């Protein structure tokens, strides 16, 4: 079969520079077949030098991984379908008080920042964080909701973030009359298949950012927004519920 290489020039120049420096490389590369289809290969490229140490070229091996890439894409589509199903299930179970979102959807749902973002990494900082968040809400919002309960829910979320993700960042935002406490971490994330049990079963631990306080947080906040995947979780507690 004849192939026409479809490779960005900048990438090619970077790889050639790396090889001249003696670096071996392993990367995926799409090759265009003469019939227009794409063949995916795994390339192993090893630099070759002559007796005087000058770069003489590369020795490369190409492994066809087209079927692997196709299977990977199918799994991704199935995963998206499962996630969409969980979005509907969780919304129904919680009366739309827990909303699963993509990172982009979370960003679009956030209001304006009303206090400088802070980092929390230890249990010693919990009391300070709770008091700071409470002070900001008291100063910037009309207290038309159970602030005491809301701060308990926020404290539970911060505690779980420290326990399961070794801390993260938190900030207070405002969208209309709704206070939003946003928490971001780089922990393991929350498995979607654990969320229905965590929602329905008091005391059930997700073994992730939400931990055992999930039902508590649902009971003390107006709404929870969640975007989660390995290495990045964003949890937003809102109160009062958006109108």
Image: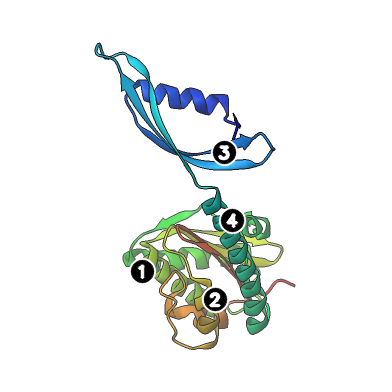
Sequence-wise, the earlier of marks 4 and 1 is: 4
Q: Which residue is mark 3?
A: 30
Colour mode? rainbow
Residue 150: give its label: 2
Q: Residue visible at 62% across and 59% down? A: 106
Give the crowd class for mark 2: few <14, some 14-19, many >=20 residues within 10 Å.
Answer: many
Residue receiving disc 1: 163
List the single residue furthest toward the top: 52
Residues 212 and 17: in front is 17
Q: Nearer the viewer, mark 2 or mark 4?
A: 4
State which quadrant residue 143 falls in: bottom right
Secondary structure beneath label 3: strand
Q: Earlier in the sequence, mark 3 or mark 4?
A: 3
- Mark 3 vs mark 2, CA separation in Å: 52 Å
Query: What residue did someone put label 4 on?
Result: 73
Distance between the alpha carbons at the discs numbered 3 and 1: 42 Å
Measure the alpha-carbon separation of dots 2 and 4. Answer: 42 Å
**Where on the picture, by quarter, is residue 7?**
top right
Q: Of label 3 and label 2, which has the lower sequence position?
A: 3
- Who's the residue at 56% across and 57% down the image? 71
């Amino acid at each position: 079969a004849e192939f026409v290489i479809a490779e960005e020039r900048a990438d090619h120049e970077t790889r050639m520079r790396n090889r001249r420096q003696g670096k071996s490389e392993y990367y995926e590369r799409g090759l265009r077949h003469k019939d227009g289809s794409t063949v995916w290969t795994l390339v192993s490229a090893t630099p070759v030098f002559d007796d005087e140490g000058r770069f003489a070229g590369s020795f490369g091996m190409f492994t066809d991984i087209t079927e692997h890439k196709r299977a990977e894409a199918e799994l991704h589509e199935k995963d998206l379908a499962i996630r969409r199903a969980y979005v509907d299930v969780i919304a129904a179970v919680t009366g739309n008080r827990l909303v699963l979102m993509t990172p982009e959807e979370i960003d679009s749902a956030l209001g304006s920042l009303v206090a400088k973002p802070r980092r929390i990494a230890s249990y010693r900082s919990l009391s300070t964080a709770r008091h700071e968040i409470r002070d900001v809400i008291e100063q910037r919002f009309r207290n038309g909701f159970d602030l005491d309960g809301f701060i308990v829910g926020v404290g539970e979320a911060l505690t779980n973030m420290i326990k399961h993700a070794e801390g993260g960042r938190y900030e207070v935002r405002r969208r209309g009359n709704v206070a939003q406490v946003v928490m971001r971490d780089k922990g393991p994330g929350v498995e979607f298949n654990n969320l229905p049990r965590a929602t329905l079963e008091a005391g059930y631990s997700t073994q992730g950012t939400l931990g055992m306080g999930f039902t508590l947080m649902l009971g003390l906040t107006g709404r929870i927004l969640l975007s989660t995947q390995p290495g990045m979780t964003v949890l937003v507690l809102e109160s009062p519920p958006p109108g």
